[in-house]
Image (cartoon, rainbow, N blue to C red):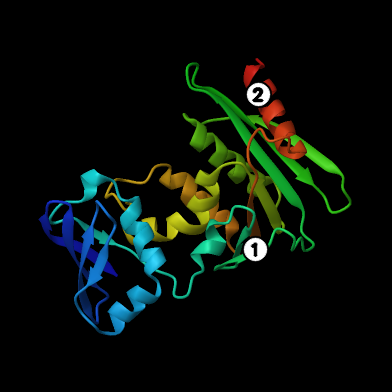
Amino acid sequence: MSLEITSENGTKYTIKVDDGYSVVNLDFDTSNKSLRFFDENDLSEFLMKNEFQFRGILHNKSKESFFKGFKLEFSLIDGKDITEFKNRENIIVKDKGKIFVISDNDKGSIPEVYTDASYDEVLSRGAFCVLRKNLDGVYESSEFFCSCQDSNSAELEAVIKALEIYKDDLRIITDSQYVRKGITEWIIHWKLNNWHTANGTRAKNIEMWEKLEKLCENRRIEFGYVKAHNNHFENEYCDLMARVKRKSE
């Protein structure tokens, strides 16, 4: 689908949405987040049915990206449960092209891999740790220097390395929402919009995202989240080993 801002009046913007079959015009007010549809057709019903997803795109846009003439290609997943995806305790699964949510309690029978990075912005130096917990409870740990130039990229590089080392189905546990949401949600829209964000800016780390997506193909990769520095054993271990590696020669 395509979105175009066709007019503006203060904080109120008229937006045209086109899916190639139908057109819907609507008003969105950035001050109070009110949304009003003008047309009634299959497309408007679809947008209203998936309003939380659609609002997510509008709410995440920066103020500077609201102007007459702004255009964006986007997609919505029919029936997607936003609440389940936003619940950080849940696991988001990429399974051979399908994306869905399961409970953290649904452990299954795949190994867990924990990753964490440590990056010094002043010294432009970073490292990360990959910690695998096998089904028998035995741990394997590896540490690497980063080749990237910022903290988010370092977290992304850690997950990529984990999937390069281990070729089987995995549950990746990271404290990076950038990585978790990027590979399971944002990348879908970036690709449709020629790797541009909802603000119209070029997405960062495109080659790394493409590599990560390729590594997820034809296998089941589960993405879990753990809060950093919250007395979580595996995450604390990865953080410590990443810092030790970063400070080493």
Three-letter amino acid code of the residue under disc 2: Arg
Which of disc 1 and disc 2 is earlier in sequence? 1
Which residue is at the front of the view, 83 or 145?
83
Q: Position of residue 218 (x, y in %)?
A: 61, 65
In the rendered structure, the answer to whether residue 21 lies left or right of residue 108 reads left
Q: Could you say which quadrant of the image residue 192 lies in? A: bottom left
Whole-percent x, y for residue 179 in the image: 53, 46
Does residue 179 appear to the left or right of 232 in the view shown? left
- Residue 242 position (above or below residue 88): above
* Residue ID at (71%, 26%): 240
- Please determine whether, in this image, residue 194 is positioned above or below residue 78: above
Q: From what the image shows, is residue 71 above or below residue 228?
A: below
As helix, strand or loop, the secondary structure at mark 1 comes to loop
Q: Position of residue 215 (x, y in %)?
A: 58, 54
Which element type, helix, strand or loop, lies under badge 2? helix
Viewer-nearest of discs 2 and 1: 2
The residue that appears at 70% across and 37% down in the rendered structure is 235
Whether residue 40 sits left or right of residue 176 in the image: it is: left
- Give the alpha-carbon distance from disc 2 to disc 1, as whole Å: 31 Å
- Residue beneath the point at 61% across and 32% down: 117
**Residue 195 visible, this orientation:** no
How dense is the environment of label 2, judged by Cα within 10 Å: few (below 14), some, or many (20 and up)? many
Q: Are marks 2 and 1 in contact (CB under 8 Å)?
A: no
Give the numbered dot on residue 54. none
State the image coordinates of residue 151 (x, y, percent, origin top left): 51, 32
**Residue to which mark 1 is pinned:** 219
Q: Quadrant of residue 51?
A: bottom left
Residue, disc 2: 243
The amino acid pointed to by label 1 is Arg
In which quadrant of the rendered image does the C terminus lie? top right
Specify whether residue 138 is in view.
yes
Residue placed most toward the observer, 163 or 189: 189
